[in-house]
Amino acid sequence: YASLTEIFSPQGVQDVNGNTLKPLTGTNYELGVKGAYFDGALNASAALFRISQRNRAVRDEANCPTSGVASCYRAAGEIESDGVELQLSGALTPSWQISAGYAYTSARYTRDSVAENVGQRVSTDEPRHLFLLASSYRLPGRYSRWTINGLLQGQSRVYTAEPGYYTEQGHYLLASLGAVY
């Protein structure tokens, strides 16, 4: 499949003067493939995308160096995001379901009123890599009322750097196990 969409989204944040920013505009391009295999027991998809945005709200640290509720924003010039999404899901057996997914996104300034931003990453507090692996297994026979679940999810490092303030969450992989009766 191929998709081309136009973006128009009003923004509810304000600049340093208390004015609401102009709407976010842009274009989203996506190419992908989806398929069902083994009589629908396995579903797969892969997609490549590029999102071009204008007027995206970004923190205005130069004119309003505060964080939290008191922040103000400015409209970025142009931002381009490129990425890929991969997904597999299905039944390994009638009792065993599994799902896996991976996403990569890179968003960079392509034009901006702050010249040193051009070519730089836009949102360092959003991960570039996301991973998910989930599985569930219904036990056989007299234990068939029980389902065992497992989940692995991970993401790459994120951070926020503001004048006088820095916080970081390193990359992680989280494992969860559970049972349902």
Image: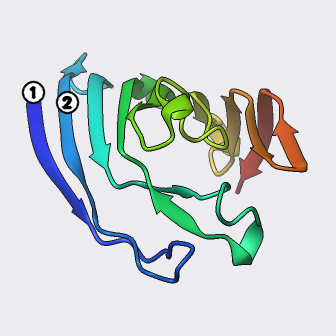
Residue 51 placement, left or right of 58: left
Rate crowding at label 2 as few (under 14), some (14 to 19) or many (20 or more) other CA atoms within 10 Å: some
Residue 29 placement, left or right of 120: left
Residue 163: image location, x then y, percent: 82, 49
For label 2, the residue is 30
Which of these two is toward me, 116 or 130?
Answer: 116
Which of these two is toward me, 88 or 147?
Answer: 88
**Image point 43% across, 44% down: which residue?**
113
**Image point 27% across, 38% down: which residue?**
52
Residue at the outermost right position? 164
**Image point 69% across, 48% down: which residue?**
146
Secondary structure at numbered mark 2:
strand
Q: Are marks 2 and 1 in contact (CB under 8 Å)?
A: yes
Name the mark on residue 1: 1
Quadrant position of residue 8 = bottom left
Secondary structure at numbered mark 1:
loop
